[in-house]
Amino acid sequence: MGTLASELLPASRASCLNYRDGLLKLEQVLLNRKRKMGPTTAFPILHRVAALSSIRSTTALRHSLCKPTVKLCYASLCTLQQMRCVSTETALSQHISDLTDREKRLLTKLYDGLIRGQRAALAESITLVETQHPRKKELAQVLLQRVLAFRQEQEKRNGGNPVAFRVGLSGPPGAGKSSFIEVVGKMLTGRGHKVSVLAVDPSSCTTGGSLMGDKTRMTELSRDMNAYIRPSPTSGTLGGVTRTTNEAIVLCEGAGYDIVLVETVGVGQSEFAVADMVDMFVLLIPPAGGDELQGIKRGIIEMADLVVVTKSDGELVVPARRIQAEYTSALKLLRKKSKVWKPKVVRISSETGQGVPELWDTMLQFRDAMLNCGELRIRRQTQQKVWLWNLIQENALRHFQQHPAVRAELPELERRVTSGDISPGLAADLLLKVFSSVQ
Ligand SMILES: Nc1nc2c(ncn2[C@@H]2O[C@H](COP(=O)(O)OP(=O)(O)OP(=O)(O)O)[C@@H](O)[C@H]2O)c(=O)[nH]1
């Protein structure tokens, strides 16, 4: 069956339609045989469909492909799980029944501390979800499930509305992000909010260095008992950004933080990942000239619900006004992201505080408009799905790369591809065949 999957589903990304045909044929064959797929068959199919996600323009097609694939694979995985007496539903309770007394005590301590809003418990819980240790990862999932259940209860009591407002902040280095967070954060804690700040530093996963962490940032806010600031380290990949940060958001919300600010520097793909995990995405732009603004990707402007021109004070007011006008016209040309909200461009100064209360009012207008029309809920649901697929893609790829047969064949195939002997498509096909035949 593994071979059958490889034959019916061509590896070439260009032939997306063939994928659809292949899947339909495969479905037919499976129905005729009245056989569910084994993992050997299911896995390469999942992998191939997941690989399609790298083609932006085929999103709709990918979704249409994912559905039948997931249906097929799910059936097969369920069989496998039944064989092992481990269904997805029982997996978690098994985790729980497997817990040692020490682990149970730890989780109870963390959970109780967390929902009472204890910072130490929150910090320890976030460390647990960031861990790479397999057993601790399982414990983290048990904790997260409990916190999710708690949060769902809170949302029910809140009329089905989210209990926290998640805001993503991005901008080039030096745009004034930390000064902005300091001022806005202080204003919000002064109004009785609890604010958490998760700082995603993409450089920590690519270079091991840090764009954000080398200096003391947000000194006043970090001393505020109603604020919690935490760097959100990334575990090597974009999926790592998504996973640890998303889970940290859940924990912060469980700990009673009703405003979660997720900050990232506009480097690499991390800002796209952050835009995909928040209710509102805010882009911060300094009032600087051409070169500094070159680094701002067009795609990220499209993601913005609000553009904030920073440092609008003293001599910088004039360039800030110019940048505001430029961005206002640029935004008019972009496709609308929401039916009820038109992205705005505002000017503020963290130094004088000018424009900051008005900015927060604008952000609340956004939240209310999105909540009332139901778009916020849909946005969150879509984000959950994107997160699920990011993780499947990442795990599937890691599983494939670590497979002994793949590792054995890979160097030679890479050599033949680079020397032009065979096409990358054929090499990928061969590797997938090796992967699916030797399990
Ligand atoms: N005039 C003026 N300067 C500001 C303002 N906000 C920030 N700055 C200055 O701009 C510089 C960068 O500010 P940060 O807040 O550290 O910027 P950042 O985006 O967090 O920078 P990275 O941490 O490097 O990403 C600092 O020297 C600040 O003093 C402002 O409102 N007005």
Image (cartoon, rainbow, N blue to C red):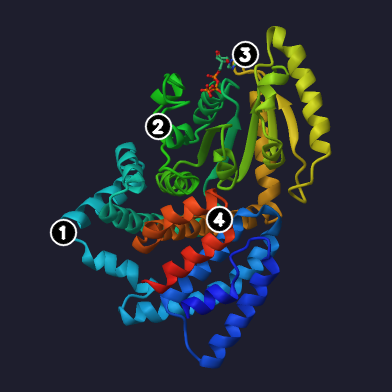
Q: Tell us which disc is closer to us: 1 or 2.
A: 2
Ligand 1 quadrant assignment: top right
How far apart marks 4 and 2 lie (CA) works out to 36 Å
Q: Residue 421 in the image: state x and y as whole percent.
A: 55, 55
Crowd rating for badge 2 (residues with CA inside 10 Å; few <14, some 14–19, many 20+):
few
Please tell me which residue lies in front, 201 or 434: 434
Residue 198, position as x, y percentages in the image: 46, 36
Work out which quarter of the rendered image holds the C terminus and state it. Answer: bottom left
Residue position marked by numbered label 3 in the rendering: 352
Circle nearer the viewer, 1 or 4: 4
Give the percent coordinates (x, y) of residue 436. 43, 71
The residue that disc 2 covers is 208
- The secondary structure type at the circle numbered 4 is loop
Q: Is residue 92 left or right of residue 169?
A: left
Location of residue 38 (image quadrant): bottom left
How far is the residue under mark 1 from the one under mark 2?
37 Å
| Mark 4: amino acid | Asp
Q: Earlier in the sequence, mark 4 or mark 2?
A: 2
Label 3: few (<14), some (14–19) or many (≥20) C-alpha neighbours in 10 Å: few
For the point 50% across and 58% down, the residue is 393
Q: CA distance from mark 3 to mark 2?
A: 36 Å
Q: Answer yes or no: is residue 367 visible.
A: yes
| Residue ID at (40%, 32%) | 208
| Nearest to N terminus: mark 3 or mark 4 | 3
The residue drawn where x is 44% and y is 20% is 220
Residue linked to disc 1: 101
Q: How many marks are shown on the rendered structure?
A: 4
**What kind of residue is marked 3?**
Thr
Q: Nearer the viewer, mark 3 or mark 4?
A: 4
User: CA–CA distance between discs 1 and 4?
Assistant: 59 Å
Residue type at mark 1 is: Asp
